[in-house]
Amino acid sequence: MRIYNFETASKKRTSRVRWLRKGLTHIFNSKRLLLSWFFRLFAIGVTLVAVLFVYLSFTLPDPNTLLERTVPESTKIYDRNDQLLYEVHGEIKRTLVQLDAISDYAKHATVAVEDKDFYSHSGFSVRGIFRSIWKDIQTGSAQQGGSTITQQFVKNALLTKDKHIIRKVKELILSVELEARYTKDQILQLYLNEIPYGRNAYGIEAASQAYFDKHANELSLGEAAYLAALPQSTTYYNPLGPHRDALDRRQQTILGLMETQGYITKAQKDSALQEKVAFTPLKNSLK
């Protein structure tokens, strides 16, 4: 007959508990060590990023000089009746205008399609950046911009258009500085005078003249939506090119965004969709 030894069983239980405690203590200490190293590395990373930001900030253009900077404009030649004969522009046709000389339709169409949160963000969109990164990972390329209107202006006016990480960091720094120094209207004015629309036209006034032979404050809703469609890809959306159907669809999309975001009513959108928009042929110009 087997005799159960309570003393031996008790010792075994005590030994198991002791080893269990040692194991848990070892795991806990290991986790504490890992967390400690994680926070150390995180702190080093934050410090390095801060140092990089400070260093790059000293190598960037001064945002305070943007409104006074010299921007090349076209030279226009008129006849005695003030009719435009030629425009001498080299590689760029541009006429700078104040924001109040631009149609509200053009301003609203641009904001609706390029940066719907323009009036609420501080120069960049965290959601847009992560969406861009995710798209780049999915496609295996660096094609997604994720840029706000402020970032697009900085990229076009002050920096290069490459996709290097240092250039992107510079873009973010300058965008934040611009938002701190200028009003939204000033930034929108800078942007609308800077971006390319095709036909060598840079800025909304030059684009209005190039495509519709009118000033930017005379644009109809349909015309403004077409112009807002062009900067994404001026060659592909060339109205006289083979992708006119794509341009028409993009214009319709922009009108829908304007309605959704409260810039126009459904009746205004429907009226613009029925509007017969005619693009003018290329004008005479001298390089």
Image (cartoon, rainbow, N blue to C red):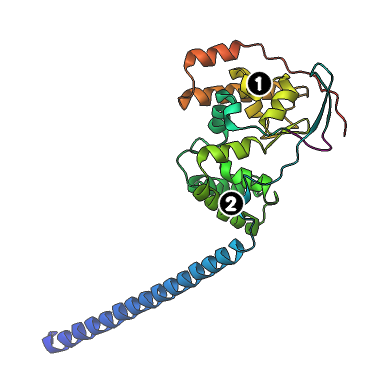
Label 2 environment density (alpha carbons within 10 Å; few <14, some 14–19, many ≥20): few
Which residue extends farthest front?
80
Query: Foreground: 277 or 128?
Result: 277
User: Mark 2 and mark 1 in contact (Cβ < 8 Å)?
Assistant: no
Q: Quadrant of residue 217?
A: top right
Quarter of the figure with residue 147: top right
Decide whether residue 90 is among the magenta residues. yes
Q: Which residue is mark 2?
A: 64
Report if residue 265 is visible in the image.
Answer: yes
Q: Which residue is mark 1?
A: 248
Is the stretch drawn in magenta largely helix, strand or loop? loop
Residue span colored magenta: 89-94
Residue 285 lies, in percent from the top left, at 85, 28
Residue 253: % across, % down? 57, 24
- Figure check: 125 above or below 237: below
Mark 1: secondary structure: helix
